Image: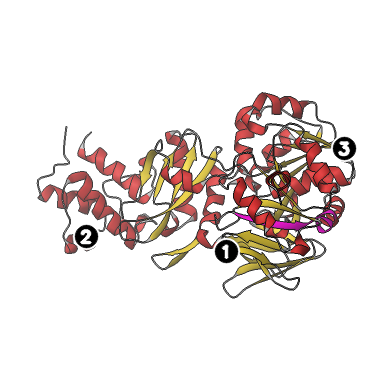
Amino acid sequence: MTNIEKLTNLAVEVFLIDPSEFRRDLRRDEVGTWDSLGVVSLAVGVQETFGYHFTQDEALSVKSFADVIRILEQHGIPFDEP
Amino acid sequence: MSETARTQSILVEGIPNHIGSLGSLWDADDTFAYVASKSAISREWIADSLERLPEPYRIGHFCLLTSGSTGVPKLVIGRKSRSEQLVKVLHDVQQSEAVEETIVSLPLSYCYAFVNQWLWSRVYNRRIVVTPGLSQPNVFLETLRVARDAMLCLVGPQVALLAQMFGEECFPGVIRVHFAGGRFPQEKIPLLKRMFPSALIFNNYGCAEAMPRLTLRRAEEAEAASDIGRPLPGVRLKTGGSGELLFLSEYRSVGLVDDAGFQAIADDEWIPSGDLAHCGDNGRWQLLGRPGEVFKRYGEKVAVPQILATVNRHWPGQIGYYRDKDGAGEDGYVLVLCPPPLKDQLQLLFRAFRTSHSRTHWPLRIESAVSLPLLPNGKVDGLALRVAGDKFLHWRQRV
């Protein structure tokens, strides 16, 4: 499974969105279930799925999945996979 | 009292000719206990309890075993004359004159079946057809097929099994279908009307201490499963300080026996039904859940029955749940589906949770089981479900 597939599954699981709704640029304000507990859930999910623990600033700065991808790529987790 | 005499006052359901014996015990003066063949309570404890009843309760009464809302077994003592009076009230409000027979699919020692079915059949001299219920589907199916002007008393969890086993069948000989003993399967009314096209469908509400009925409503009268309608004649309802539903009833039990011994129930004593409820401006009562089913999670009130109503609208199978805590120690619940859901079905549930409920209302986990453990009265056994080892995890919250 590619990292983008893992992130898609995580988004579905944490925010209960349909898989077809997931986009890399999907923003927090477009997802009604991306509430404060959702922020925590996403951070826990990222750690469990990718082994990276968001810092507090990173967790609070995430406004879209593009932000999640950017942070993970900065820590050596690639999303531009073949 | 000799050992022989003591055991004679306990009738065990299912022994040969137990229906005949039940009639004899009802006609006799002595108080008796009627218990299921499988019971967590020893016959010795029941015999001792009967023996210790105060003198006024040793004549003209009967005892049934219940765990009620607390899960703690106790004997509930009813007065025969009161229950016969309730049966007459029920006969009128349930429009039972046209009913010629009653088909039993629940343990008769269960208060609901005992009064609604056995005692009714006795008072009105109607036929009682005792079946093994859904534990032997073929026998039950054949009974339903040949039913004539029959009354059927069910509990909600049986509907999914009925649909699964013979949902394509139609039973025009059943003219009354009653529900009690748990959540009313409001979402399954279209299915029930297809299966029982001649039947009036009723939601009965009560508890063992009420012996057992408090309210009644036709299925069509309301859209919410939590709507239990209005009190029966002779019944008064109110809520206590914590929102608990309290009742006064002319037909209620007169005492209880538990490990603490015998406790009489005074005529003017308001008795908790075990549920939280409120009365609307229209005089109709709405259940909010049992105290254990309503809790706070991250400061937000969660009423599990309301959430299960959402699940019921989108899930055709059986539903169970048990309480648990998340990693932060916050209260929550685990939803258990039976049979295991398909991916699309799970996605439908996700959408329903997402659009109808905030995150705090979502289950901690969604699990499935091949079968749900049931209590003898047909309700899901939440304690057994919690420890069942053959559950499969489909989804979980990450907090």
Question: Spatial distance from mark 3 to mark 2, Cα to Cα?
Answer: 68 Å
**Of all residues shown, which one is farthest toward the bottom?**
B241
Question: Spatial distance from mark 1 to mark 3, Cα to Cα?
Answer: 43 Å
Share a chain, discs 1 and 2?
Answer: no
* Spot occupied by residue B250 in the image (x, y as percentages of width and height): 80, 64
Q: Is residue A57 magenta?
A: no
The 10 Å Cα crowd at callout 2, few under 14, some 14 to 19, many 20 or more, is some
* Spot occupied by residue B223 in the image (x, y as percentages of width and height): 67, 53
* Quarter-of-image position of residue A59: bottom left
Residue holding disc 1: B260
Q: Secondary structure at mark 2?
A: helix
In the image: residue B200, left or right of residue B134: right
Give, as a three-letter code, the residue at label 3. Glu
* Spot occupied by residue B7 in the image (x, y as percentages of width and height): 69, 44
Q: Is residue B83 magenta?
A: yes
* Quarter-of-image position of residue A6: top left
Give, as a three-letter code, the residue at label 1. Ala
Question: Spatial distance from mark 1 to mark 2, Cα to Cα?
Answer: 55 Å
Asked whether residue B207 is in view, the answer is no
Disc 1 vs disc 3: Cβ atoms closer than 8 Å?
Answer: no
Identify whether B15 is placed above or below B93: above
Task: Name the disc covering residue A59, or none.
Answer: 2
Task: Name the disc covering residue B100, or none.
Answer: 3
The 10 Å Cα crowd at callout 3, few under 14, some 14 to 19, many 20 or more, is some
Q: Secondary structure at mark 3?
A: loop
> Residue under mark 1: which chain is it in?
B
Give, as a three-letter code, the residue at label 2. Ala
* Spot occupied by residue A34 in the image (x, y as percentages of width and height): 34, 57
